[in-house]
Amino acid sequence: MTGDFVKVANAAEIPPGAARVFSAFDTELAICNVDGEYFCIADLCTHDGGPLGEGELIGNQIECPRHGARFDVKTGKALCLPAVLPVPTYKVELRGEEIWVAAQATTSGAR
C-alpha cells in the first residue's frame, strides 16, 4: 500500500460501461467505468446487502440485481426504492494504466 491508496486493478480490466468487483483492504469494491472515468463504490447494496457489482451500469447509475435499487456511482446516492441510504464511495486515482483506490470511504452507506 502506498499512502492511503492501494492498487486495485488495471484500467484495461474494466471496459467503458462496465463494473467489475475487486477485493482490497478486506472490502469488496465495485469499480465502474463511466465514459472512461473510474468510480468506486462498496459492492454492497444498502437495502439488503446485494452485490452491486453484478448489476447493470447505465451511465452513472448502477442497479442492484436483487430488487432494482439504483445508485449514482459518482456520489453513492440512492436514486430509487427500495434503497434509501447511500452506498459508500471511494476516491479513485488513475496512475498511468493502474487504478488506485483510497482505503477510506468518502461517503458512508452505514445503516
Image (tube, grey):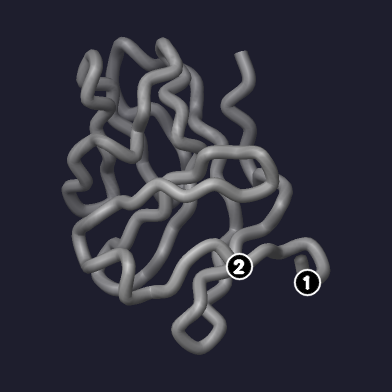
- The quadrant of the picture occupied by the C terminus is top right
The correct choice, above or below, for 56 with respect to 37 in the image is above
Could you tell me residue 13's position as x and y percent? 32, 68
Q: Quarter of the image holding residue 102? A: bottom right
Label 2: few (<14), some or many (≥20) within 10 Å? some
**Residue drawn at the location 40% of the way across and 47% of the way down:** 21
Using residue 97 as the reference point, say whether residue 68 is left or right of it: left
- Locate the N terminus by quadrant: bottom right
Total number of numbered discs in the rendering: 2
| The quarter of the displayed image where residue 5 is located | bottom right
Earlier along the polypeptide chain: callout 2 or callout 1?
1
Numbered circle sitting on residue 56 = none
What label sits on residue 2 in the rendered view? 1
- Left/right placement of residue 108 relative to residue 104 reads left
Give the residue at x 66% y 46%. 106
Which amino acid does the dot numbered 2 rest on? Lys
How many C-alpha atoms fall within 10 Å of the one at disc 1: few (<14), some, or many (≥20)? few
Q: Residue drawn at (34%, 40%), measured in percent from left and top?
A: 53
Residue 16, image x and y in percent? 22, 67
Is label 1 in a helix, a strand or a loop?
loop
**CB contact under 8 Å: marks 2 and 1:** yes
Using the numbered discs, state the Cα–Cα distance from disc 2 to disc 1 in whole angstroms: 8 Å
Res 7 label: 2
Q: Could you say where residue 51 lies in the image, as x and y percent from the top left?
A: 36, 28
Query: Looking at this rendering, what residue extends furthest in the bottom direction?
Result: 96
Tell whether 62 sits left or right of 25.
Answer: left
Residue 17 occupies quadrant? bottom left
